[in-house]
Image: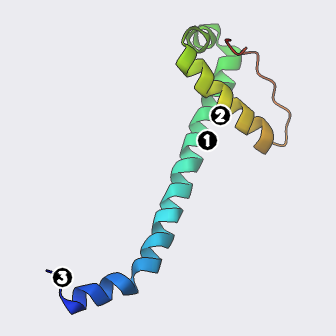
Amino acid sequence: METPYIKFLREQYAAAMKKAIAKENAKLNTLYKNLSLSIFDEAQNNEELNNIIKSSPKINESFQKLVAIFNETTPKNTKSNIKDKE
């Protein structure tokens, strides 16, 4: 059973918790974006990595989604030499 004091604290700090969670999610998204961009850049110069990405339909599909997002959010016009498997 929750005491009135605990209930009060939970309500009082709910907004702060939501803000903290959003901040942590933004940090994670930035980390994922940086990792994916690093993989993308390396795949441009590394034939073996490029072949690994192309050989797995799931990896290729996910990677193409990331490439599309980066092309939308990155001011430079980065082109991928990795083709979609259909």
Q: For the C terminus, give its image quadrant.
A: top right
Q: Is residue 20 above or below residue 52?
A: below
Of marks 3 and 2, the one in the foreground = 3
Say which residue appears at 62% left-offset and 11% top-offset: 54
Say whether residue 10 is left or right of residue 79.
Answer: left
Q: CA distance from mark 3 to mark 2?
A: 46 Å
**Around disc 1, counting alpha carbons within 10 Å, would you say few (fewer than 14), some (14 to 19), or many (20 or more)?**
some
Say which residue appears at 59% left-offset and 49% top-offset: 30
Which residue in the rendered view is the most extreme toward the left?
1
**Around disc 2, counting alpha carbons within 10 Å, would you say few (fewer than 14), some (14 to 19), or many (20 or more)?**
some
Discs 2, 1 touching: Cβ within 8 Å? yes
Q: CA distance from mark 1 to mark 3?
A: 41 Å
Say which residue appears at 55% left-offset and 11% top-offset: 52
Dot 3 corresponds to which residue? 2
Q: Position of residue 13 (x, y in %)?
A: 39, 82
User: The disc labelled 1 sits on which kind of residue?
Assistant: Lys
Of marks 1 and 3, the one in the foreground = 3
Dot 2 corresponds to which residue? 37
Please tell me whether mark 2 sits on a helix, a strand or a loop.
Answer: helix
- Count every numbered label the image shows and give the total: 3
User: The disc labelled 2 sits on which kind of residue?
Assistant: Leu
Camera-side residue: 85 or 25? 85
